[in-house]
Image: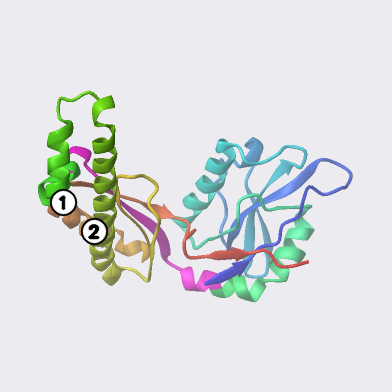
Amino acid sequence: MSTSDQTTDAPEREGTKGFYVYGIVPADVEPEADAVGMCDSKVDVVKQGDIAALVSEVSVDRPLGKPEDLRVHAHILDGTSRVAPVLPLRFGAVLTDADAVKEELLGEHADEFAAALQELEGKAQYVVKGRYVEKAILREVISENQQASDLRDTIRDQPEDATRDARMALGEIVNNSIAAKREQDTRTVVDALTPLADSVNVREPTHEEDAAQVAVLVEVERQGELEEAVGELAKQWEGRVEMRVLGPLAPYDFVVTQTPEG
């Protein structure tokens, strides 16, 4: 699925305010009264026909990109995904005013946004993460690889300087073995989740001990089934892999935003 966003650089105009756009939602969505956006501003909606944009005022003189800004951006979108379909816009989308949001963003892409929202109705993203238990996976690698076992015996109780080459060789074997196990275990996770999901996206590992990172687009009503499936994997891998589910989240992995040329 693909949607488009249109952003502007800090506009040259009177005043210092712009409209930060978080995402696109159906026109009947209303933010919570106490929702707080960028720069502690109130979150509002700009409507155009059957669709709307979640927005808040920001100072165009203040650079965006602080960790707190990223957290606010995700918090607004993820909170919305619990109650309505939402199309996330790329972080940093700022337009000059409400009219620009209506005309340049909503008006120009109304059909595209409406179709994507319809496709996402009742669904949200979940991320299933598995992390190897360090001692357990090292024992597994060494028990399965004679060379690794021999190297472990070589460096045991020896000074680090005297066994530098052996330690480097063992580290390489361990890293390669974990990469192979990650590929196999990720396939297992994908196979377990595919029957529940509309779409599946395998993410790249973000930690050397990641066993799997898989994003799935799932009907919110099936969250219990998803958690049960992950729970079965956790039982299967008890003591070896720690499993968790994040979500519901906005569908970051399944909505591709593109900035129009010109």
Q: Is residue 52 magenta?
A: no
- Does residue 254 lie above or below 243 as drawn? below
**Quadrant occupied by the C terminus:** bottom right
Q: Quadrant of residue 108?
A: bottom right
User: Looking at the image, which residue is at 55% across and 65% down?
Assistant: 256
- Residue at the spot of label 2: 185
Q: What is the x, y in percent for residue 80?
A: 50, 54
Tags 2 and 1 in contact by the CB under 8 Å rule? yes
Q: Secondary structure at mark 2?
A: helix
Q: Amino acid at mark 1?
A: Trp
- Residue at left 64%, top 42%? 42
Q: Residues within 10 Å of mark 1 (few under 14, many from 20)?
A: some
Q: Circle 1 — which element?
A: loop
Q: Which mark is residue 237?
A: 1
- Whether residue 159 is visible to the viewer of this picture, yes or no, is yes
**Residue in the image at 47% along x and 65% along y:** 254
Horizontal side of 113 relative to 237 (left or right) equals right
Q: Position of residue 107 (x, y in %)?
A: 72, 69
